[in-house]
Image (cartoon, rainbow, N blue to C red):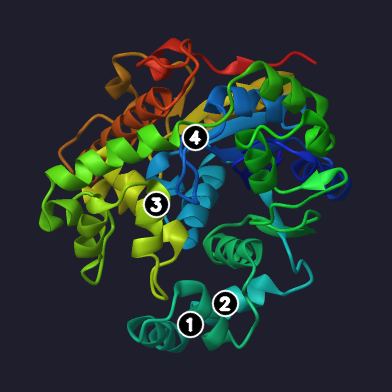
Amino acid sequence: MIYATGIVAEYNPFHNGHLHHLTATKKIVDQPIIAVMSGSFMQRGEPACLNKWLRAKLAVQNGIDLVLELPVNFSLRSAQYFASGAVQLLNATGCVNYLSCGAESPKQNFTALAKKITAPATQELLRQKLSEGHGYAAACAEVLQQALDKPNDILALEYAKALLATDIKPLFIKRMDNGYNSIDIDGSLASATAIRQALAEQQPQNTWQQAVPQATLQALLQNSAGFDENLLWQLICCRLRLLSPAEIAARCQCSEGLENLLKQSSACRSFSEALQLCTKKRYSTSRIRRLLMQLLLDSPRAAFEQAAPAYLRVLAFNDTGRQLLKQMKATATLPIITKLGKNYSAYATQPQDDTQAQITEQNFLMQIQTEIKASDIWSMLQKEQTLNRPGNDFLLSPNYVKR
């Protein structure tokens, strides 16, 4: 039996901070690495800077052995569901025994905090704080009496919570860049946000190239990284203007009348203006972005409220990853998708007489169909003509990287 360590990431794009995390993980556990990676849309609520197959290839070129896709039904959700979906995917491989998480405060006992916050009394207090208008992270920090104002510390807590239902053990690695939202490039370390901004502003190559590995640098120089934000807003605005508030609420995870605020934003002239209008103390900018992306995908709200992933989809692998995939044919508890064909429904559990099997197939189809929409919309937003085409989920295969 080959055991592996899991990493959950977005690699948007893969930079030196990710390489540090990977290298530090391998120093602690000498075993293969399986990454669960967001596909076409990110958890902060925006399209990826490069297509998912290329980002997965870069991850393998830099030391990951196997990359599995986190369905967009989970990548476009809040931290707790993003983390839960990713952990369930890793657990479903049947061969992951560690999860390595980047955190701003790695010495924090996130497992103890996870046990405390999942206790019934704490959950009741948390619900009370949320009902009073606190944001989720602030409410968690208050009920736990801990400072949890850093994005990766919040994610680390959510990973620890999700791991309580598994036998996977957590590893917490110190995050080494200037922070998740930092736009500073400090020598060889920078956040993905800073690198994407440098690319969007067409800053000189020498201002950011030192912050990424060579393979990433070549990919960013050879490909049109980023997306057309004006077109993105036009597509979203079209959806907002065509739908009533009730129809908006039926297609994304609105609550507390937020659909009315989103409807009002259809009068805005830009994406940034809409975000400024909708962002409040209770509604973070990232949450508004995610809701607008969910709305853009035009799937039923139920697609973003599923409790568990329905498949394991391969995006890239090396020889070790190939061995893991061969083993997973016996150990995995979810269907494994390599090349997606038009008859993708064959991967789903065929409906039996019992209701659970039928629900399983329904969830599978809802997830994969939403993923196909996400890839097609991502393609529409690309200025590069060769990328601006439908059907990439059927046309592109997982990347095999030979060592």
Q: What residue does disc 2 label?
A: 115
Give the quarter of the figure containing the N terminus: top right
Which is nearer the eye, 253 or 208? Answer: 208
Which is nearer the eye, 231 or 153? Answer: 231
Where residue 316 sits: x, y (%)? 61, 23
Q: Are marks 2 and 1 in contact (CB under 8 Å)?
A: yes
* Element marked by disc 2: helix
Q: Are marks 1 and 3 in contact (CB under 8 Å)?
A: no
Between marks 4 and 3 in the image, the one whose residue lies nearer the viewer: 3
Q: What residue does disc 1 label?
A: 119
Residue at position x 49%, y 77% in the image: 118
- How far apart, in angstroms, are the residues tagged by discs 2 and 4? 30 Å
Amino acid found under the numbered disc labelled 2: Lys
Q: What residue does disc 3 label?
A: 290
Query: Which mark sits nearer the N-terminus, 2 or 4?
Result: 4
Query: Which mark sits nearer the N-terminus, 4 or 1?
Result: 4
- Few, some or many residues within 10 Å of mark 3 (<14, 14–19, 20+): many
- Few, some or many residues within 10 Å of mark 4 (<14, 14–19, 20+): many
Find the residue positioned furthest to the front.
269
Residue at position x 63%, y 39% in the image: 196
Q: What residue does disc 4 label?
A: 39
- Few, some or many residues within 10 Å of mark 2 (<14, 14–19, 20+): some
Where residue 53 sits: x, y (%)? 56, 23
- How far apart, in angstroms, are the residues tagged by discs 3 and 2? 28 Å
In which quarter of the view is residue 276 placed? Answer: bottom left
Residue 67, visible in the rendered structure: yes
Query: Which mark sits nearer the N-terminus, 3 or 2?
Result: 2
Give the quarter of the figure containing the C terminus: top right
* Element marked by disc 4: loop
- How far apart, in angstroms, are the residues tagged by discs 1 and 3? 29 Å
